[in-house]
Amino acid sequence: MNAYMIWARTHRPTLTKANPNASNAEISEQLGIEWRKLSEEQKMLYYAESRKLHWEHRQQFPDWEYNPRPRKGKQVGQKKAASETIDMQTNLMLSGSLQNTPSQRRPDPDPISALPPFPAQLSCMPEPLFTQT
């Protein structure tokens, strides 16, 4: 579980109680906004907790590997055929449209590699930052 998911798990109930008529999508959007407002220092506790959970999982399941299963049946809003998508990408690359285009993916801000190995000291989670209004 990543740092954001750990943080959201502790804050979602409070935000949901404070906004009982909000949809899950609206709650998720607000959680994302609040997470981005936190400083890196405030997020470090959650990054540490994420690393601890990752370490514990490796201890419990040393041979575990992620093996995604293909989806069954039709997907809603079926995507274009792979050959059609590849043809479009090839045309864009040849035309130069994809050159010098910045990547849409944000870099991973998770500084887990900077943390000491566990189990140095297990972290405690603070109370949620939201208050009921």
Image (spheres, grey):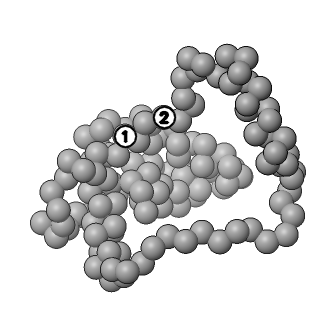
Task: Residue 49 in the image: state x and y as whole percent.
Answer: 30, 61
In the displayed structure, would residue 70 be above or below residue 107? below
Residue shown at 24%/50% (left/top)? 113
State the mark number for residue 71. Answer: none
Q: Residue furthest left?
A: 120
- Residue 78, position in %: x, y? 86, 52
Q: Residue at x 26, y 57 (%)?
A: 48
Residue type at mark 2: give it.
Arg
**Label 2 to label 1: alpha-carbon separation:** 8 Å
Quadrant of the image containing the N terminus: bottom left
The amino acid type, in three-letter code, at marker 1 is Pro
Mark 2 packing: few (<14 Cα in 10 Å), some, or many (20+)? Answer: few
Residue named by callout 2: 106
Residue displayed at 39% across by 54% down: 3
Q: Check disc 1 and report the residue beneath it.
A: 109
In the shown orientation, is residue 27 left or right of residue 36? right
